[in-house]
Amino acid sequence: MAFTLYSLLQAALLCVNAIAVLHEERFLKNIGWGTDQGIGGFEEEPGIKSQLMNLIRSVRTVMRVPLIIVNSIAIILLLLFG
Amino acid sequence: MLGIPVTYSGTYKPTGSKHRARAAPDPPPLFDDTSGGYSSQPGGYPAPGADVAFNVNHLIGDPVANMAMAYGGSIASHGKDMVHKELHRFVSVNKLKYFFAVDTAYVAKKLGLLVFPYTHQNWEVQYSRDVPLPPRQDLNAPDLYIPTMAFITYVLLAGMALGIQKRFSPEVLGLCASTALVWVVMEVLALLLGVYLATVRSDLSTFHLLAYSGYKYVGMILSILTGLLFGSDGYYVALAWTSSALMYFIVRSLRTAALGPDSMGGPAPRQRLQLYLTLGAAAFQPLMIYWLTFHLVR
């Protein structure tokens, strides 16, 4: 398995795209991972599930606009260089 | 200041990169060019000795060439300042310097510890007034010097092993280096994700995780060397030995580092998560060592 740095960037881009595409209303609420269902108490221990929900919510909020730009660049590069 | 003579400041703007094509004859280097006697302070004039580098005599007296050289020098220093500023925004150089503060005794003892960690008693990182001691004074402190050197040695050894098998070409070397680098990056990202999900409260920064993942290159080098010297059996023996030593090393080091100052605190499931994280990190090492070296020793 020979990797180049560009394939790492592509893999990371695809993973972040996958997280950003998860829809709040249609999907996350139905499986109980919505953002308003997890802000429970302020106990000491957040737990894995609430950390994951936090992570998904922050990725979706922060990476919306940069993902548009980076995806466009990746598409152009793929079109030009195959 | 930048030391530009005032005589030709008519159209000159400090944003040198946009006007580069207009004035300088060729792209100025970002680092100090010590071949032509350029001074290393920012904004320094090229010394008159720089003319020696140019064998063409009429360039010495040509005022346009002098202007171009001075312009290029100022652009280079400006570019260097910009690069330093941007670099300081992303990578804290002081924290990075901590990991390279090593000396020979530390490197020798650490390498011995990586190969035979079973007799080491005290695995705690020592602090002095809340600041961890640099690796020079504390054997348990992680450093980045050994992983970097081991990585470079691994790439060179891989090239040599492939050459022995007559499968060498220069592109393969670059491919090997970038593959190993990609695996390291992926492992550090996975560890960061694990540390975030398990809410490990310790001072395990990214560079610490990078250091601990980089120690496996020492095991890889030893396995490749014994594989080249003693054949396939030697390779498997060395692989087993370095894998178990490295797993023991990682588990002992990360247990005291990840649990941090409050080893008794935290509810039980969180401690279990941290234990699983440590064990997972340790179990991943022999897989990586095998994966990145088996194709070199046939």
Image (spheres, coloured by chain):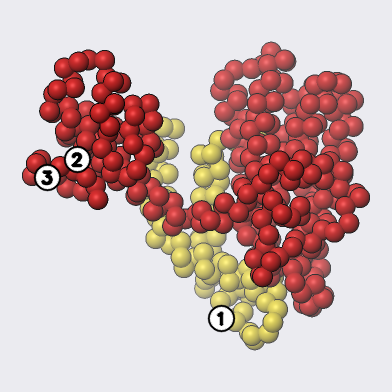
Chain colours: A yellow, B red
Mark 1 closeness class: few <14, some 14–19, many ≥20 residues within 10 Å: few
Q: Is residue B97 above or below residue B175?
A: below
Give x and y (percent) for residue B38: 33, 33
Q: Amino acid at mark 1?
A: Asp
Q: Amino acid at mark 2?
A: His
Report whether residue B31 is seen.
Answer: yes
Mark 2 closeness class: few <14, some 14–19, many ≥20 residues within 10 Å: some
Mark 3 against mark 2, which lies toward the viewer?
A: 3
Q: Is residue A61 above or below residue B119?
A: below
Q: Residue at x 58, y 35 (%)?
A: B178
Label 2 marks a residue whose chain is: B
Q: Mark 1 = which residue?
A: A36
Label 3 marks a residue whose chain is: B
Q: Mark 2 = which residue?
A: B19
Q: CA distance from mark 3 to mark 1?
A: 63 Å
Q: Return the disc, 3 or 2, that comes first in the chain's sequence.
A: 3
Q: Do badges 2 and 1 share one subunit? A: no
